[in-house]
Image (cartoon, grey):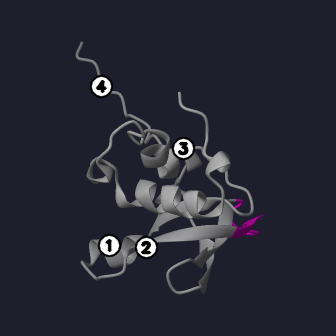
Amino acid sequence: MAQQPQAQAAVRPTTTYIKGDLVLFRDVERFWLGKPGHTFIGRVERFWTHVDTGKLLYDLTELGSLSYRAGIDPDYMRPLPAADAMHDIDTAPLSEPDTGAMTPAAVAWLRQHLGQDSSALPARR
């Protein structure tokens, strides 16, 4: 007797966010319709459970325009970890004489800190 194919459950992220977290959000309707402005960086302002569906939803501030977006589905959000944002600075080739080998963010960070106090630089790894 032939076996019936097993239905596979969709795998969805189970990340939960707290107030102040930075996330990448995609407006799925705009995305599938090919409209611009479908993906943005947001800051979590609050989270709540929808009374009818029991689904956890989020309210975000879109950082580019400071607009408030309510009722965001977390299936279309991804975390933006600090380690990723700081990777270029953490791995900057500080022993290189040529700052061209560093990313603009690393150079800006170094200039800012050197302008204040050179003893504030982190220890070499």
**What's the distance in space between the residues labelled 2 and 3, CA to CA?**
25 Å
Amino acid at circle 3: Ala
- Residue 83, disc: 3
Counting other residues with Cα less than 10 Å from the Cα at mark 2, is it few (<14), some (14-19), or many (20 or more)? some
State the residue at coordinates (53%, 27%). 125
**What's the distance in space between the residues labelled 4 and 1, CA to CA?**
35 Å
Q: Secondary structure at mark 1?
A: helix
Viewer-nearest of discs 1 and 3: 3
Viewer-side residue, 61 vs 107: 107
Q: Secondary structure at mark 2?
A: loop
What residue is shown with label 4? Answer: 4
What residue is shown with label 2? Answer: 27
Counting from the top left corner in percent of width and height, residue 27 is at 43, 73
Q: Are marks 2 and 1 in contact (CB under 8 Å)?
A: yes
Give, as a single range, the part of the protein colored magenta: 45-54
Counting other residues with Cα less than 10 Å from the Cα at mark 1, is it few (<14), some (14-19), or many (20 or more)? few
Counting from the top left corner in percent of width and height, residue 102 is at 34, 50
The part of the image, by quadrant, that contains residue 38 is bottom left
Amino acid at circle 2: Asp
Counting from the top left corner in percent of width and height, residue 72 is at 58, 70
Q: Is residue 48 magenta?
A: yes
Counting from the top left corner in percent of width and height, residue 1 is at 24, 12
Query: Mark 4 or mark 3, which is nearer the start of the sequence?
Result: 4
